[in-house]
Image (cartoon, helix red, strand yellow):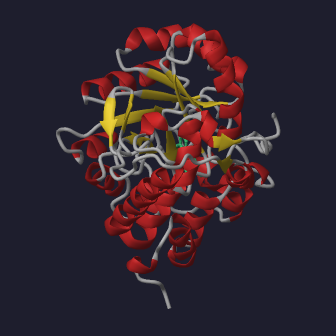
Amino acid sequence: RMPILEQCYNLMDFEAVARRVMKKTAWAYYSSGADDEITLRENHSAFHKIWFRPRILVDVEKVDTSTTMLGTKVDIPFYVTATALGKLGHPEGEVVLTKGAKKHNVIQMIPTLASCSFDEICDAREADQVQWLQLYVNKDRAVTKRIVEHAEKRGCKGLFITVDAPQLGRREKDMRSKFADIGSNVQSSTGDDVDRSQGAARAISSFIDPSLSWKDIPWFLSITKMPILLKGVQCVEDVLRAVEAGVHGVVLSNHGGRQLDFARSGIEVLAEVMPVLRERGWQDRIEIYIDGGVRRATDIIKAVCLGAKGVGIGRPFLYAMSAYGGPGVDRAMQLLKDEMEMNMRLIGASDVSQLNPSMLDTRGLSMH
Ligand code: FNR
């Protein structure tokens, strides 16, 4: 028998239910990683290499899990990251996540390849709610400019340019399921014909510009006042280059293990990046986020201790939405908040600003 919602006690429980109830093609699209899925697994195991050094006898009667991201106050240091094709998992698609994000006062990043139209997702938001836009850059820059200008006009507060997908990775599970009903599941802003024989991911991505380069960054900075962040940065050299290019932030990410297999996990790269930024005194010139494999509040705490402003979470909310709809997303977010409060208490931090590198033992990470 299928567990009822109240029997889901952590984010992995939603995944187990989703796997049983979702259509095979949808499960294949959401769950798959690139090639041998080594990076997909590493996104979890990297967190398991970091241990805590909690501090005792700190007054933790009151614990405040809130923080700010790009100037927006949020309840807890995570955001709902961009994941394409929400209607594969739920008939209402991304707006289900919009409502959950509102209820828990966290930010939603809207994907370029959403199932709902961009305007539907904006319309679903409450007046005081903040959304960001994830951008796949179109070969036709006039199209990209229109998307960016429209997003700014509709009140988006951050532009996350995906830089780890000049070509979509091979997700073989997804390819095998020979995606059939793609047409009804994406609001194509591209107008291109889709090739359905290659799985969902490749079918919808042919418009993405593989010639995108550092030379294009000044142009992006010139067409919008939104803060610009690069999503998918994977080494310290590129973080330094991003600072020099004048962008506002980066997401250390491997796209949920869906692009380059054997890419390192975001948390591992974070441990490489922060000491170098601090050495140069650049840590306040840029906001650093990570995503990939975050399933527990302890994962969030580890990232914040190392210096991340926050973390993105993808699949767990897709699974919660697919299995239980809005109430599933609500419960998944509440579980994370409860875990966050308890674990901050156990670590000896009464607010997020007290989380720092000395609370971690990172000797298990390969670079130390
Ligand atoms: C993604 N991700 C993603 N990223 C992006 O920039 N544009 C996109 O369209 C998508 N689409 C997408 C679909 C699905 C089904 C998944 C699982 C992921 C990557 C996403 O933003 C994020 O990097 C990862 O999902 C983070 O890893 P976890 O939390 O899923 O482990």
What residue is drawn where x is 43% and y is 27%? 159
**Residue 142, percent across and down?**
43, 19
What residue is drawn where x is 79% and y is 45%? 364
What residue is drawn where x is 40% and y is 60%? 338
| 328 lies left or right of 193 | left
Q: Quadrant of residue 235?
A: top right
Q: Quadrant of residue 110?
A: top left
Quadrant of the image containing the C terminus: top right
Closer to us: 37 or 343: 343
**Residue 211, percent across and down?**
66, 20
Q: How many marks?
A: 0
Closer to us: 296 or 115: 296
Closer to us: 238 or 104: 104
| 45 lies left or right of 320 | right
Compared with 37, 168 (above or below) is: above
Compared with 119, 215 (above or below) is: above
**Residue 105, percent across and down?**
29, 46
Closer to us: 10 or 132: 10
What residue is drawn where x is 51% and y is 19%? 286
Compared with 163, 118 (above or below) is: below
The residue lying furthest to the front in this view is 57
Compared with 21, 163 (above or below) is: above
> Would you say residue 195 is visible in this rendering?
no
**Residue 346, percent across and down?**
51, 55
The residue lying furthest to the left in this view is 127
> Would you say residue 269 is visible in this rendering?
yes
